[in-house]
Amino acid sequence: MQRILDRYIFREIAGTWLAVTLVLLMILLTNQFASVLGDVAKGKLPRGVAMEVIGLSVTQYLTILIPIGLFLSVMMALGRLYRDSELPAMMACRLGPMSVYRPLLWLAVPLTLSVAWLSIDVGPKALVKVERIGVEARRSADLTSIEPGRFTVVGSEEDDAVVYGERVTPEGGMENVFLKRQLADGAVEVVVAERGRMVSSEDPDVRFLVLDQGRRYEGVPGTADFRVVEFGEHGIPYRLPSLEPDEPEPREQPVNSLIASADPSDRAELQWRLSVPISTMLLALLAVPLSRSQPREGRYGRLAIGLLVFIIYFNLLSAAKAWIEQGEISPSLGLWWVHGSLLGLSLLLLALQNGWIRRMFK
């Protein structure tokens, strides 16, 4: 009898989780697909890597979708069983709270282990891969990748320039070119020319934008001290983005580097990655008492409360992560107080609904 009920509850939760997760994933992938196709059309990404970028994005989306999908699926599945008086009938047959958690753990434990693997190892590697694809595309881009009639940033973040071309020829040249570049001494360089083309140099990390028949303005904005130069041909060097950044961001670092680091940003990132599997299990624990409803209660009343709790929980996690990075709270306290608060709320709801506090005081 117990095994039959366990399998029944497990099928209800697992089927709902699969449907909820797939729907949310398809919504996110639709937006991602449109964005990637737009980048391919503009020449920012090669055509052959579009599906690879979308596939790598799936691993990053699942780290968030698995916890929220499990939380919503438990609330929806158990909420339906409460509304249809199936769970009250089971409880009348001495089905206690642990009898509900047992089939839930059959699903929650594998999902927690999977999301831990995605969050700690696979997700950061996928993020690095996507960043590298973008950098390689920018390094291999020429003037044909510039969309006519729109301002485009070329070069690295430290040495970039804004380029505008009224028309782009099939040979890779531009006509009626405008270029603006910020110089190291605070001055601004503005160049207008009839034509432009891109030329490689001996340094693979440096290229030249060669402009023909134009005028160059150089000076500090807000002052009258500007130098104007007319030219027949003018070459402007710019540095390409590096394939290997000098200081990778914490979210791009492997977990071993984060563990060995004492930097607050790295400690915050490490705790954030560990928080994803922890939140998966805690949200599953909270969903059971939160889904309990009366037979005549509204269909989506408890679900709205659950979404509000989820939003507050993840906003607190994000705020605590920022506080660690800014040094406002100790990494020892870190994100653990947020998880502890959610665990305390879950135990309190269980105690109130099952009369544990009343029996303890009696």
Image (cartoon, grey):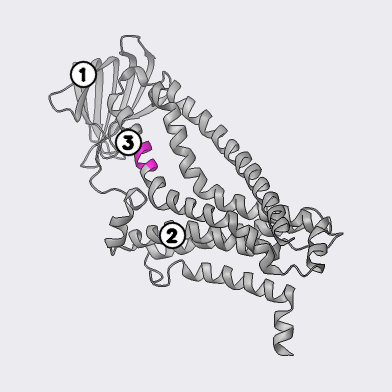
Say left or right for 62 vs 241: right
* SS assignment at label 2: helix
Q: Please report the bounds of the magenta region as a residue range.
A: 126-131
> Above or below — where is 211 with respect to 18?
above
The residue under label 1 is: 199
Q: What residue occupies the far bottom of the structure in this picture?
A: 362
Give the number of the disc on residue 274: 2
x, y percentage for residue 183? 23, 37
Q: Is residue 340 visible?
A: yes
- Helix, strand or loop: magenta stretch: helix
Left or right: residue 189 compared with residue 360:
left
Q: Is residue 130 magenta?
A: yes
User: Residue 255 appears at what percent x and percent y?
Assistant: 33, 55
Between the residue at mark 2 and the residue at mark 3, the CA separation in whole angstroms equals: 25 Å
* Mark closest to the chain's N terminus, 1 or 3: 3
Q: Give the residue displayed 46% in from the left and 42% down from the top.
A: 59
Residue 24 lies in the magenta stretch: no
Look at 27% across and 61% down and name the residue there: 260
